[in-house]
Image (cartoon, grey):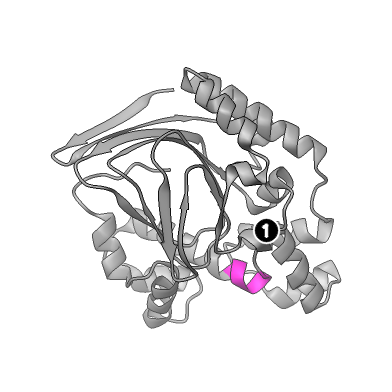
Amino acid sequence: MAVHRHVWDGGWWEVEQALPDVRLRRHVVGPYVAWREGTVAPTVRRECAAAIVPLIVNFGPAYSLTSPAHSTQRHASFIAGVYDTWVDVAGATTADAVQVNLTPLAAHRVFGVPMSVLANASGAVDDLGGRSLIEELGNATTFAERVRLLDAFLLERLLRAPAAPRAVRYAYETLVAARGQARIAQLQHDTGLSPARLGAALRDACGMTPKQLAGVLRFEHAVRLARRAGRGSWSAIAFECGYADHAHLTRAFQRYAGESPRAWAARAAVAVPEPEF
């Protein structure tokens, strides 16, 4: 569990990461992340649309979330549903928190609420049955201990909750595997569900219709390619991700990131490296 630390004129941050229990690998996206920071000025980070459900257990000042989808929401520890737009997360000059990124299907089982309730919105962890988790993680003295507590909490919740219906899992996994480029009509045919029934079932389990989820997954893939390829390759990225042309890709960035691809790239290339959550 190495600690990565960065110091610059405006402050410092440090990040520690650990993989979840192997039984959780298909439910948790990436590692558990603990981060701490101190800055001269309050932080504001732009989070683009993504097909994940972040769980933030916070031991520092509260965060404010502002998005075109809702008025400003303020939380200490919170869960953010799947957004198909951007959100600005404003913090204080200090931070101390742990983040776990869940798949939408896992979040649906862990917190026992329709994901449509959290679509383009956030909810307090203690309002969703997580008060004991906040207290236990707050009392833990090491990140390793917090990792064990997170593993236990998630495994217990997943074991007692039924999995999503097979048709929903198939539709979700097919869209993820195709990076959003699966044909919706084919999903309806394969699952035997009408457009209305498939849309309602996926909204309940994921917070989005198949078309909405496909759009976010395709944008996520474009962002991944842009991070690897750098500037000057937007037309190739548009083609790889199934956009009609560069203009189509630009409209996707405006919707999901709130800015053009060039503006996004310029922000992503700032001199101070951002901690990756």
| Residue that protrudes farthest toward the right in the picture | 192
Magenta region includes residue 212: yes
The one of 241 and 54 positioned closer to us in this rendering: 54
Secondary structure, mark 1, is: helix
| Left or right: residue 87 compared with residue 211 | left
| Magenta-colored span | 209-214
Instruction: Say above or below: 248 vs 30.
Output: below
Instruction: Say above or below: 148 vs 66.
Output: above
| Left or right: residue 216 compared with residue 191 | left
Q: Quadrant of residue 182?
A: bottom right
In percent of width and height, residue 39 lies at: 23, 40
The one of 138 and 152 positioned closer to us in this rendering: 138
Q: Is residue 57 visible?
A: yes
Please tell me which residue is depicted at 43% across the width and 43% down the height of the picture: 277
| Residue that protrudes farthest toward the left in the picture | 9
Magenta stretch prevailing secondary structure: helix
Instruction: Say above or below: 197 vs 17.
Output: below
Categorize mark 1 by other alpha carbons within 10 Å: few (<14), some (14-19), many (20+): many
Q: Is residue 21 visible?
A: no
Q: Quadrant of residue 223?
A: bottom left
Residue position marked by numbered label 1 in the rendering: 115
In percent of width and height, residue 263 lies at: 27, 68
The one of 86 and 22 positioned closer to us in this rendering: 86
